[in-house]
Image: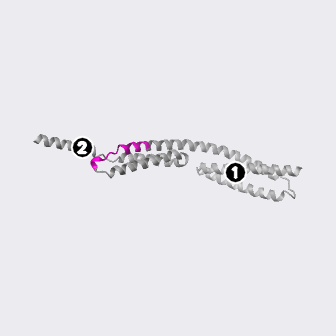
Amino acid sequence: MFKRVSSVLGALALLLAVGCSKAPEIEMTATNDALQAAVQVEAEKYAPAEYQMAMDTLNAAQAAMEEQNSKFALFRSYDNSRKLLATSQQLANDAATKAVAEKERVHTEVMGMMSKVDTLIAQASKALKSAPVGKGTKADLELIKNDMAAVQATQAEAVIDFNNGDFLTAKAKFQAVVTKTESIISELAAAKAKTSR
């Protein structure tokens, strides 16, 4: 009788040990740390797809954990949550790595754009100074001067963004400056051709 009672108690203890799976708190902390590291290197800007996948996987892991938490203690299993947390952590690390590389690539690209913008603005300014002023071109030249002032203001803003480390915003502004300055140069060339006829 005593042997039978001790076997039943032993089986019950084993069942409790297996069934009472502990929530993956350590894994959750490690995943949150990895995501925080990704945020520090601006992964949501420079590796948005990878960062979003890491967040979505974390959300799935949390949902799986909540589902297990709602179950009776003997029937809980956090294996799926652990797998999802490991995947989320890896995705966050990948996002951080990609973000660092992408930020450096954009930084280099914007530095090249800055030189191009300086050259184009100098070219447009020179063309504006030598533009023929006549009865039909005076109003057009005033508009072009206003456009040049706006271009130079945008260039100044882009330089500030670049110096503050906001390379994506700087890139967008420099692209706008390039497009507008090239348009101004074309307009001035057309005005010159028109008066020389």
Q: Position of residue 76 (x, y in %)?
A: 31, 47
Q: Position of residue 138 (x, y in %)?
A: 83, 58
Give me the disc on residue 15: 2
Of 176 and 18, the residue lying toward us: 18
Q: Position of residue 100 (x, y in %)?
A: 54, 43
Kindly identify which residue carries mark 1.
Answer: 177
Residue 150 seen in this snapshot: yes
Mark 1–mark 2 Cα distance, whole angstroms, equals 70 Å
Q: Which residues are magenta?
A: 73-87
Q: Where is the N terminus found, in terms of image quarters?
A: top left
Residue, x 39% and y 47% (percent of image)? 28
The amino acid type, in three-letter code, at marker 2 is Leu
Q: Is residue 161 left or right of residue 1?
A: right
The amino acid type, in three-letter code, at marker 1 is Val
| Secondary structure category for the residue under label 1 | helix
Instruction: Give the label, 1 or 2, closer to the camera.
Output: 2
